[in-house]
Amino acid sequence: MSAPTNAAASPRDADVIVIGAGPGGYPAAIRAAQLGGRVIVVENDNPGGTCLNWGCIPTKTMIGSVDALHTLKHAADFGLVAENVGFDFPKLMARKDKVVKTLVGGVGFLFKKHGVTLIVGTGAFVDDHTVEVTKPDGTTERVTADNIVIATGSVPARLPIPGIKETDVFTGNKEVKRKAADGTLASGAIWTSNEAVSAKSVPGEMVVIGGGVVGSEFGYTYNGLGTKITIIEMMDRIIPTMDADLGAELEKILKKQGITINTGATVTRVEDRNGRKAVYFTNGKVAEESVVECDVVLVAASRVPFTEGLNLEAAGVTLEKRRVSVNHKMQTNVPHIYAIGDVTGGGLAHVATMEGIVAAENIRGHEATMSYKAVPACIYTEPEVAGVGLTEQEAKDKGHEVKVGTFTFRNLGKAMAINQRDGFVKIVAEDKYGEILGVHIIGPHATDLIHEAVVSIQLENTVEELMRTIHAHPTLAEAIGQANEDVRGLSIDKG
């Protein structure tokens, strides 16, 4: 793939302006540059956006430390001796900061390598080809381009709950970065994920509002560091967007780890009580209101697209339910203006990356379309959770005659060898032809194992094809092969 050779040079400052350098914006910029484009990126935070600075990377680095701590505490299970095992929280967080700084620097290096110009500041449309950038010192600069990509991401949703909605934690990354610089980030008792990855100490007790991906991961992380965790989830199970069997299994395991989980519950208000927070909630199973006290309330319910200050009206770009609508080429209603990532209503970093690549390739004259057929969803608890394709219920709702196969990790030699035996693989297949419709995993390294399933669904593989695929022994991937065999009742090692 290369840039069109007959493209005339534009009189504007750039061929492409990308507003936002997150996991969608920076790949869009680099791909456009790889294809011969002159590219300007406007970013008011460090390169990498929420994912690298405040989300995916810091959380997974903290989880990595907690996982290592768990292994050390269970050294005796491996025939090892590890005494006086503990953790140094400032050093743990310093490691997190070092990982983030290294990766931020990596994005900056890639910009230089590919000739991408980075302007630090906040971008706003002047018209459909012009962006005005307000820099940290208050000065402004106007830049023009033939095409513009909106990649401004999202912010934590402000829940309409008394005692929470009044707080000032539901802000964009520019404000988060300022608070981090002046030392006020995570100084209060109401947190979002931004504060959770920036804590100065480990809370004694925490209530997590929301039992989805973010809530489950932070619940697991801080529980592993000794915090008493209570998760309150409005739906009837945690991780409600995943297959129901995964949610049931994860809830059982997290409870075994010491986390209290209330499902089908709604937080009604948060009040101050004796220097702490009192969280009131109702539960459909119990008539009266319940209350739990804590040191910190973590709001982990959802995120919303961030378009504040973009002045989209000046460019003629319209919003639909707060999000920027796009077509399969990632174009907005203004064809030379594109939008990618959370600002379009998404929520996964890897999806934003592909959307950015699709947008850049279309801008540079190539035909590219975005497909959401095989999108992996991952949760980095212990054990990990991952899924792709249709859940069992979704497949039934779409009218498929469904066959299901499962295989537990406890039956695998590799799982026994590494002392990680919890969980299973579940295959959802169409009965007549055996097409694999969905794969759902809870267990060790699930977020890595899922990619065999992603390719299988993308290529419309059948269970018979995976049954004939040789899986190395001993590996965790054998569970995928045997779950496919189980769809046809032919698993060798299923007890």
Image (cartoon, rainbow, N blue to C red):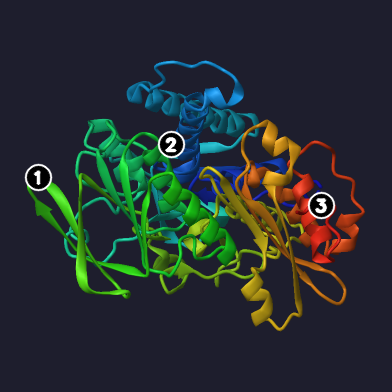
Outermost residue toward the left in this view: 274
Residue 94 versus residue 412: which sits nearer the camera?
412
Q: CA distance from mark 3 to mark 1?
A: 54 Å
Q: Residue at x 67, y 68 (%)?
A: 390
Residue 331 versus residue 428: which sits nearer the camera?
428
Q: Which sits earlier in the primary sequence, circle 3 or circle 1?
A: 1
Quarter holding residue 121: top left
- Read off the residue under disc 3: 481
Q: Secondary structure at mark 3?
A: helix
Q: Which sits earlier in the primary sequence, circle 3 or circle 2?
A: 2
Q: Which sits earlier in the primary sequence, circle 1 or circle 2?
A: 2
Q: Is residue 152 left or right of residue 246?
A: left
Quarter holding residue 203: top left
Q: Mark 3 belongs to which amino acid?
A: Gly
Outermost residue toward the front in this view: 495
Q: Residue at x 68, y 75 (%)?
A: 395
Measuring from the top left, give residue 148's x and y in whole percent: 55, 56
- Image depth: mark 1 or mark 2 in front: 1
Q: Is residue 266 left or right of residue 431?
A: left
* Mark 3 closeness class: few <14, some 14–19, many ≥20 residues within 10 Å: many
Circle 1/circle 2 CB separation < 8 Å: no
- Read off the residue under disc 2: 46
Q: Which mark is residue 479?
A: none
Q: Mark 2 belongs to which amino acid?
A: Asn
